[in-house]
Image: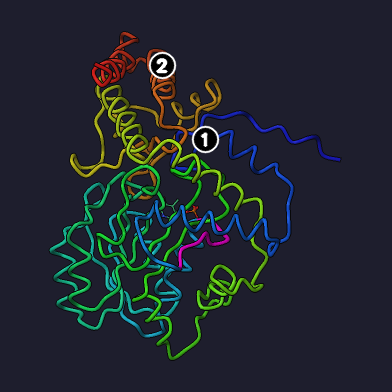
Amino acid sequence: MSEELNPHLRLLLGPGPSPVHPRILKAMSTHVVGHLDPDFLAVMDDCQGMLRALFNTENQVTFPVSGTGSAAMEASVCNIIEPGDKAIVCVNGVFGGRMSDVASRYGADVVTVEAPWGQPIDPQDVKAALDANPDAVMVGVVHAETSTGVLQPMEEIGAMCREHGALLLLDCVTSLGGVPVELDKWGVEVAYSGTQKCLACPPGVAPITFSERALGKVRERKSKVTSWYFDVSMVEKYWGNERVYHHTGPITMNYAIREALRIIFDEGLEARFARHALASKALQAGVEAFGMSMFAQEGARTPTLNTVALREGMDDGAVRKSLLNDFNIEIGGGLGAVAGKIWRIGMMGHGATQANVVYLLSALEVIFSKLGYITKAGDGVGAASQVYADAAS
Ligand SMILES: *Cc1c(COP(=O)(O)O)cnc(C)c1O
């Protein structure tokens, strides 16, 4: 027989999963009831109500999909896209690329709007793509691109999509719960997120929401949704008023997201967003004190995922291995074209704290001193401490 499970207690400061709040672990140890038990139906109602408030939407059809963020990406796209539909997808990193791949697998004729990694998409480029492709049925955008640390400004794109009759679909996986998400104000028609980034919850279910206009597109389909599992017209019969069996809801994960949402509203959205912003600012001050710079363009950075450009001659693998083995800290490396060139440091959910910023910077100072990257320890922690001191005064 295998031994009892005993994974390391890591501090998860990478691109996700993020540290799980202890209240959520406790909720997950609660006993399981049936997926149509009145107690569970109340859990479903709670989750839906709080998700609407967090997404800032009136959308009736708002619920946690059974699956991770990628499942919700697939559930969003597969309902909207019919084979042969034209889809505009904005790509400035890995997750925009994934959305484009998903759309093409469901038969979309995909047109991409691109920006260099580390920069946001220019809304004028979206407008040009819509003008050139008036038959496009959707525009896909990633709000916080986890591969680059860019936060996409969302004020303009929604109105452009409305004007052209295209549905705006937004990936909020690394933004929801960490920065403001205002779906109805921005004119977003379909959006999804995940639990393992800024909701401080393990991976397993993923918030999703469809507007009435988006559901109209689903109702007008000439062909059935290619995915049985994610067909919102069927899943909706379980999550909506009918409450009839579709698939067995992952009971424990719904306890988890319910508790995650309760924690968020206990803290308050403004306080929560301020906490994320401050942790990111302090972290940035610390890494800049090491003579390093941020990768994502200034003014377009998400506080939830901080990308740091390595200095010439720094050994990516050696630093991350020491962080993990000597300090039990996980941070992320770069993906694709920036592999070995950047680090991705998550300040997400329960992880976005002063204590974690200081601990990470201290650990980096020990490692950097050993590797000869800095001559004197204390500058990084000092700079971060100053940010917190200034914020408190
Ligand atoms: C993590 C992530 C996903 C995928 O979520 P999984 O939970 O890994 O399936 C999608 N989009 C973005 C922006 C992400 O950061």
**At label 1, which amino acid type do we have?**
Pro
Question: Could you tell me which residue is drawn at 42 percent across and 60 percent down?
Answer: 192
Helix or strand or loop: what does disc 1 sit on?
A: loop
Q: Position of residue 86 (x, y in %)?
A: 31, 80
Q: Eyeballing the image, is 283 above or below 245?
A: above
Residue nearest the observer in this picture, 308 or 174: 174
Where in the figure is residue 112, as x and y percent of width and height?
A: 27, 68
- Neighbor class of circle 2 (other Cα within 10 Å; few <14, some 14-19, many 20+) is some
Is 172 positioned to the left or the right of 284 in the image? right
Would you name the residue on which mark 2 appears?
362
Which callout, 1 or 2, points to the residue nearer the camera? Answer: 1
Specify the segment rendered in magenta.
Answer: 61-68
Judging from the image, what secondary structure is the residue with disc 2 in? helix
Q: Is residue 243 left or right of residue 273?
A: right
Instruction: Name the residue: 30% across, 64% down.
Output: 188
Q: Is mark 2 within 8 Å of ligand 1?
A: no
Name the image quarter holding the C terminus: top left
| Residue extending farthest right | 1
Residue on which disc 1 sits: 19
Q: Amino acid at mark 2?
A: Ser
